[in-house]
Image (cartoon, rainbow, N blue to C red):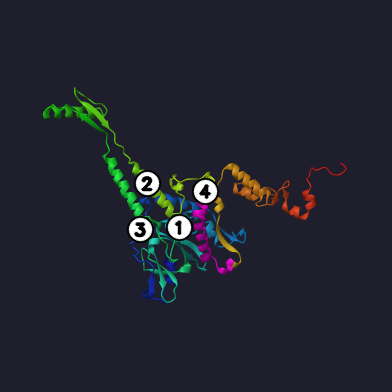
């Protein structure tokens, strides 16, 4: 996957002059990066990765999308031969939410352009700074072959919160103590469940001899088990009382709710999205979705956009108006009546054309649908500017002398 980048290895700067930013060894990660260790972490990561992957990434020049740019194929069709845009961003966000960092290698073509973007395993990437120049390098350790040094310009790197600006903090490391405590409580609860059985308290007269008492108990158990633990055979002087024991400790549910709340706090998610409704105060589904977008998704999207603009576009292209943008509007799903009112408001005020609204609803264009309209019987905007008197007159208005 990364053999073409042998030419990026440092030849004039020996390895002794490179200072590693990672304290622990590459093969000894400090956190458990598996998603199968916690239901709350799995739910949070799945929600974030699916949300990011669901948005369309576009390359704009000014206010118009540029589909002729060579980078359009990478973001709209296939970032790499093995991935679709959805799977690419889902993998990137999953790596970022588990290890704290996500990396995508810029694979160059024969002409020097970016041919593909390969998602790398964060555990195989180590950051280093050259002590002489201060440049940031990425050290890759493939399964086979020597270590390779990659310049920071050849790597897309997005991270969680970082004090140094280089390597991000792993959310799983932050939650390690919480997840360990939750695991111990669940293991203890499972041990209890395995031992929970229906119990019967059998009262026998105290004046019976031991042999007679043992015979009564044996006879009782024989009849009880043969009936499928459903029939009690009692003789004179014997009493039976059923003892019920719960298989679920109510305190376990409290621990599960606290764990979900802490996971939501670390991932900056509203707790209600992970099943904690104790502090929910939303009056509508739209308000809940809006808080999720503003507090959680918008900062992540802006981070990805800035990294793409910096690493895939030149400064000259930025000056010409090129920029990457995720369509957050794809996530703003309201009820049918709200969508209809918004579409009518946009159309009657010239914000969107009829064809743009139809396109969002999966419908084709109509004649004249590409013209901006305003209210007052939906007069074409260009006609209103060109002939204001004629445009303002209603077609069926009575004329003078009629």
Q: Going 56% across and 52% down the picture, which residue do you hit? A: 329
Q: Going 41% across and 52% down the picture, which residue do you hit? A: 263
Residue identified by numbered label 1: 92
Does any portion of residue 132 appear in the rendered image?
yes
**Any magenta on residue 315?**
yes
Count up the numbered dots. Answer: 4
Residue identified by numbered label 3: 31
Residue identified by numbered label 4: 289
**Any magenta on residue 91?**
no
In the rendered image of this protein, does residue 146 appear above or below residue 82? below
Q: What's the distance in space between the residues labelled 1 and 4, CA to CA? A: 23 Å
Observer-side mark, 2 or 1, equals 2
Instruction: Provide the residue span drawn in magenta.
Output: 291-318
For residue 256, the mark is 2
Q: Secondary structure at mark 1?
A: helix
Residue 366 % position (x, y): 67, 47
Residue 126 % position (x, y): 39, 66
Q: Secondary structure at mark 3?
A: loop
Residue 120 vs residue 176, the one in the foreground: 176
Residue 156 vs residue 260, the one in the foreground: 260
**Label 2: how many residues lie within 10 Å, few (<14), some (14-19) or many (20+)?**
some
């Amino acid at each position: 996957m990364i053999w073409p980048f042998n030419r990026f290895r440092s030849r004039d700067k020996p390895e002794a002059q490179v200072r590693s930013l990672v304290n622990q060894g590459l093969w000894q990660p400090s956190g458990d990066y598996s998603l199968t260790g916690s239901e709350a972490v799995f739910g949070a990561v799945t929600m974030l990765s699916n949300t990011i992957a669901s948005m369309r990434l576009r390359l704009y020049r000014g206010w118009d999308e540029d589909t002729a740019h060579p980078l359009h194929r990478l973001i709209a069709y296939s970032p790499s031969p093995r991935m679709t845009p959805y799977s690419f961003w889902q993998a990137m966000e999953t790596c970022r939410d588990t290890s704290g960092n996500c990396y995508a290698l810029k694979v160059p073509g024969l002409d020097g352009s970016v041919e593909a973007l390969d998602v790398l395993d964060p555990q195989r990437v180590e950051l280093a700074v050259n002590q002489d120049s201060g440049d940031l390098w990425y050290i890759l350790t493939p399964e086979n072959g020597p270590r390779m040094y990659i310049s920071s310009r050849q790597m897309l790197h997005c991270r969680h919160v970082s004090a140094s600006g280089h390597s991000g903090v792993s959310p799983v490391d932050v939650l390690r103590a919480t997840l360990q405590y939750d695991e111990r409580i669940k293991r203890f609860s499972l041990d209890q469940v395995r031992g929970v059985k229906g119990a019967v308290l059998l009262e026998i007269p105290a004046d019976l001899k031991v042999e007679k008492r043992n015979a009564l108990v044996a006879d009782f158990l024989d009849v009880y088990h043969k009936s499928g633990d459903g029939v009690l055979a009692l003789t004179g002087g014997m009493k039976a009382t059923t003892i019920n024991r719960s298989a679920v400790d109510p305190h376990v549910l409290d621990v599960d709710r606290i764990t979900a709340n802490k996971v939501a706090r670390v991932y900056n998610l509203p707790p209600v999205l992970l099943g904690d409704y104790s502090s929910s105060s939303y009056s509508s589904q739209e308000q809940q979705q809006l808080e999720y977008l503003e507090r959680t998704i918008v900062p992540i999207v802006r981070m990805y956009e800035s990294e793409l603009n910096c690493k895939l576009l030149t400064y000259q292209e930025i000056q010409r108006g090129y920029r990457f943008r995720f369509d957050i509007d794809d996530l703003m799903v309201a009820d049918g009546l709200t969508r209809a009112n918004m579409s009518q408001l946009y159309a009657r005020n010239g914000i969107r054309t009829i064809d743009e609204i139809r396109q969002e609803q999966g419908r084709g264009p109509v004649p004249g649908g590409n013209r901006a309209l305003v209210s007052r019987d939906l007069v074409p905007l260009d006609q209103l500017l060109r002939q204001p008197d004629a445009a303002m007159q209603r077609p069926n208005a009575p004329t003078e002398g009629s």
